[in-house]
Image (spheres, helix red, strand yellow):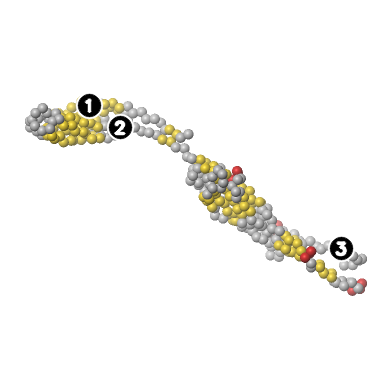
């Protein structure tokens, strides 16, 4: 340093890569030829603070759907700072392409269903690793109840250069809402008719009734073909006696039907009655189509 005094000298520029408190130290060696002694300044006025950056975190929920639909969220992280370099102070600007990006994690939480506040916590994602500014998303989740759900995202930050940040902690951001609706119901109905028969046996004399009534059910109008079902019921006691066939197989389709009934008497004083086809019926079944909920 030479020339007249006082003189102003400006330092070279310095670049720091780590948030924190720094201090300048100015030292003048003096000039003995002019009788000027050395001097230095390390006062607090030479100190300053480099603050960490405050990143931003914006989110956009995916679409909803019916119960059982997988829902997800997308978070966009911006404004992070790289990690400190090994030598924190540099005399030239560090190459940004060689800097290590901010780390940390983003966690997503899903609350609901609720229309007025966050509601209950129903899902917490695994921590999603961060590598600087970018877009991040959790694994999808399937809500089991209908209603409005709310995504909340939070970033841990990466000390000392990048602070933490959270988004929609009060669940008021409409872009973070997901609506899950109930599943439509549908039904079809099918009528079932169960055929049955009954026979009353009478004898005017000869003592108590004794024998068996045989019922045969046909899916034809004239007892033709092979019986679809048959049953034999005992008859015993004073005349008259009524016996029921029991239930034949249920019928689900339109058709004509007939019964063949016989009585075999085991009382020698009373005659048997041979089988005859004297009971017929016709059934029309009309089932409606499917009915769907509104």
Q: Residues within 10 Å of mark 2 (few under 14, many from 20)?
A: few
Question: The residue tagged with tag 1: helix, strand or loop?
Answer: strand
Please give the name of the residue rendered at 29% of the width and 34% of the height, measured from the top-left corner: 250
In the displayed structure, does residue 54 sit left or right of residue 263? right
Looking at the picture, does residue 157 appear above or below residue 193? below
Disc with the residue nearer the chain's start (2 vs 1): 2
Q: How far apart in space, not on screen, are marks 2 and 1 (Cα)?
A: 17 Å
Q: How far apart in space, not on screen, are marks 2 and 3 (Cα)?
A: 111 Å
Disc with the residue nearer the chain's start (2 vs 3): 3
Question: The residue tagged with tag 3: helix, strand or loop?
Answer: loop
The tally of labels here is 3
In the displayed structure, does residue 183 sit left or right of residue 220? right
Disc with the residue nearer the chain's start (3 vs 1): 3
Q: Which mark is residue 193?
A: 2
Query: Along the line of sight, which residue is nearer the eye, 195 or 122?
Result: 122
Query: Residue beneath label 3, please?
Result: 8
Please give the name of the residue rendered at 16% of the width and 32% of the height, measured from the top-left corner: 241
User: Would you say residue 35 is visible in this rendering?
Assistant: yes
Query: Along the line of sight, which residue is nearer the eye, 129 or 188?
Result: 188
Give the percent coordinates (x, y) of residue 191. Answer: 34, 32
Please give the name of the residue rendered at 83% of the width and 62% of the height, measured from the top-left corner: 10
In the displayed structure, does residue 138 sit left or right of residue 133? left
Query: Residue beneath label 1, please?
Result: 279
Query: Along the line of sight, which residue is nearer the eye, 95 or 20?
Result: 20
User: Would you say residue 74 is visible in this rendering?
Assistant: no
Looking at the picture, does residue 1 appear above or below residue 220? below
Give the percent coordinates (x, y) of residue 187. Answer: 41, 35
Please give the name of the residue rendered at 10% of the width and 27% of the height, measured from the top-left corner: 204
Give the percent coordinates (x, y) of residue 286. Answer: 36, 28
């Amino acid at each position: 340093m030479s020339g007249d005094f006082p003189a102003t000298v400006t330092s070279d520029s310095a670049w720091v890569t780590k948030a924190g408190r720094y201090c300048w130290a100015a030292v003048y060696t003096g000039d003995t030829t002019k009788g000027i002694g050395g001097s230095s300044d390390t006062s607090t006025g030479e100190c300053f603070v480099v603050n960490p950056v405050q990143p931003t975190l914006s989110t956009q929920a995916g679409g909803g759907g019916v119960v059982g639909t997988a829902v997800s969220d997308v978070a966009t992280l911006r404004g992070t700072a790289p990690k400190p370099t090994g030598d924190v102070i540099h005399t030239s600007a560090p190459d940004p392409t060689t800097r290590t990006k901010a780390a940390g994690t983003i966690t997503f939480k899903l609350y609901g269903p609720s229309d007025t506040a966050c509601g209950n916590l129903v899902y917490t994602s695994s921590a999603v690793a961060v590598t600087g500014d970018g877009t991040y998303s959790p694994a999808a989740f399937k809500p089991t109840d209908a209603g409005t759900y709310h995504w909340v995202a939070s970033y841990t930050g990466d000390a000392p250069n990048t602070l933490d940040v959270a988004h929609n902690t009060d669940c008021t951001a409409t872009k973070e809402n997901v609506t899950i609706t109930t599943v439509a119901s549908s039904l079809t109905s099918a009528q079932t008719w169960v055929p049955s028969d009954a026979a009353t046996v009478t004898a005017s004399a000869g003592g108590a009734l004794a024998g068996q009534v045989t019922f045969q059910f046909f899916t034809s109008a004239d007892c033709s073909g092979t019986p679809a079902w048959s049953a034999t019921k005992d008859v015993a006691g004073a005349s008259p006696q009524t016996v029921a066939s029991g239930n034949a197989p249920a019928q689900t389709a339109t058709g004509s039907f007939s019964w063949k009934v016989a009585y075999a008497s085991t009382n020698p004083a009373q005659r048997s009655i041979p089988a005859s086809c004297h009971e017929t019926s016709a059934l029309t079944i009309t089932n409606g189509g499917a009915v769907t909920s509104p």
